[in-house]
Image (cartoon, grey):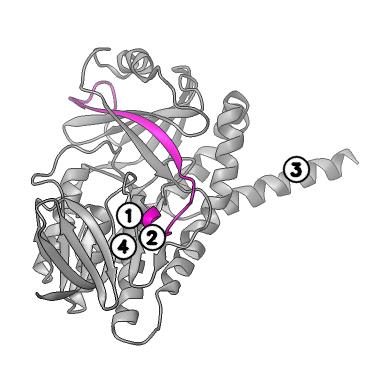
Amino acid sequence: MTIRDVLIIGAGAAGSTAAFHLAQSNYKVTLLEKEEQNKLKPCGGGMASSVQHWFPFDLKPVVEEVIERVEFSWYLDDLVMAELPGNSPFWIVKREKLDEYLANKAIDAGAELIKPFEVSQVTKTAKGWIITDKNYKQLKSRALILANGSNSLWPANFGLGPKSKHLATTTSIRLQGRGNLTKGSSRFEFGLVHHGFAWAFPLNDCVNVGVGTFIGKSSSNNDYILEKLLPNLGFDPKSGSRIHSSLSVWNGNHKINGEGIIAIGDAASLCDPFLAEGLRPALMSGCEAAKALNEWLSGNTSNLDGYSQAMQKRWGKSMAWGKRIAQVFYRFPKVGYQLGIKRPTAPQRIAQILSGEMGYEDIAKRVIKRLMLQRFHKE
């Protein structure tokens, strides 16, 4: 039986990114994908344009819309509009197109894609890994990447990621047409959603609309919320097929690597706990996983701990503050909207976070500084 260098479970954005970079380094890489055909994914599709520098090829072919301004609302009113700084700070993509595009780039670089391949068993051996599908087909590899999303069973089986997942609940739909969304504009609605927010991201010929609950128990009235939101966006309140899903968001710094194994993307619970940004950490973790595995497979390091350390530094440090902000904002959303979103500089700060120019720790430091100044003036 052929022994690959790396097997990757999941050919989404994270897995395909890792596959591309590893294949470029001349490793034998195989992507394993459960679905035979790419299907609509419950994802808003927002992606910071700063991810472009992680790839030697142009991502523009799959960019549906460049966001230039963001509109915020409270109970469909009290509108705030923010012009985004910089050039092309935020892109909107169709996830199924992005995933296919990245997978094809990985294949062009020399990676192999096997689909459908539904993994039923993952076994650690003295020499690496044995992956078995539901039809008892087996593949062997020296290393393994887990990239099959929030509902993956395998990270917990091998002690990777949080022991207790923090699950956000989402309801998403894709609507044909633009409604009343203008070109280059996206929308965030806060008042309608208990412990969360709703979003509308325009694509070339349609709109991704969703509702997410990020702390506490999941909301059972997402369909009701959409029936209120959709007419405000220029759509029929009953239009679109709802996709309900759970999203594992960042819940503390945890080890996301083991002996010859790495978890990336949603399988590593990396999604932003405040704004639900998942694509940037997915692509980032795919790149970092490839770097760590390159060092390990070539014998330059004895373990893969550098991967977890890199993700904690590059992503976890900011998310620790993002989680704190989310817990306060979503418990007291009206106050958060008034003091956060409606503050003159706040929308620009959110835009800078989405673009990758700023982290949550920068916002937290500014807030602490303001509180200290206010206290000083009172004294």
Q: Secondary structure at mark 2?
A: loop
**Mark 3 and mark 1: Cα distance apart in space:** 44 Å
Assess disc 1: are there few (<14), some (14-19) or many (≥20) residues with their C-alpha within 10 Å of its C-alpha: some
Rendered residue at 54%/33% (across/down):
341
Does the residue at mark 2 contact the one at mark 3 (Cβ under 8 Å)? no
Camera-side residue: 329 or 136?
Answer: 136
Instruction: Tell whether 154 sits left or right of 177.
Output: right
Foreground: disc 2 or disc 3: 2
The residue at which mark 4 appears reads as 286
Q: Is residue 34 above or below residue 4?
A: above
Does the residue at mark 2 contact the one at mark 1 (Cβ under 8 Å)? yes
Q: Secondary structure at mark 1?
A: helix
Residue 236 at x, y = what percent?
Answer: 24, 12
The residue at which mark 3 appears reads as 371
Foreground: disc 3 or disc 1: 1
The picture quadrant where one finds residue 340 is: top right
The residue at which mark 1 appears reads as 154
Tell me the number on the disc at residue 158: 2
